[in-house]
Amino acid sequence: MRQLLMAAAAATMMTAQAYAYDTNIVTFQSGNEIYQVCQSAKDVERMLCLGYIEGVTDAYETYRATQGMQPCIRPGVTGGQLIDVTVRFYRNNPEKRDYAASSLIQGVREAFCPGK
């Protein structure tokens, strides 16, 4: 099971990095979609936002761990903070919103992993 999880996390991260800047790739979610649901007043859309961001972040952290790297996300960081960072990233980089939504990890890395 551990090997399967590590393989899935690595595949997710390689996919996120490979496709994050390729607008010709069909993905499950785009940055535009995540940006929209993360700002929604509807609870169900906010839950989708949170689940997606936490999933991408968990996969990134798992990948880092499998590579012997230190974690980026410090204990105590909340899902709300991850949402805020993601919304800020897409607000400040509107030219990247059409990329795969998994590219949001760039904003998380900038906020929590500078120099790592």
Image (tube, rainbow, N blue to C red):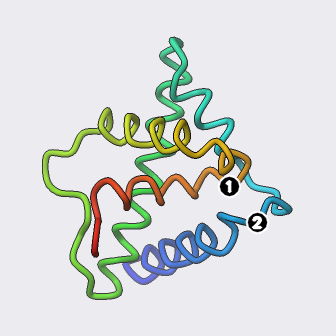
102, above or below 82, in the image: below
Looking at the rendered structure, the kind of residue marked 1 is Ala
Comparing 1 with 76, the one in front is 76
Q: Which quarter of the picture shows residue 5?
A: bottom left
CB under 8 Å between discs 1 and 2 = yes
Q: Label 1 belongs to which residue?
A: 100
Label 1 element class: loop
Q: Which quarter of the picture shows residue 37?
A: top right
- Looking at the rendered image, the quarter that the N terminus falls into is bottom left
Label 2 element class: loop
Residue 43 drawn at (x, y percent): 48, 16
18, above or below 67, in the image: above
- Looking at the rendered image, the quarter that the C terminus falls into is bottom left
Q: Which quarter of the picture shows residue 26?
A: bottom right
Comparing 62 with 113, the one in front is 113
Looking at the rendered structure, the kind of residue marked 2 is Asp
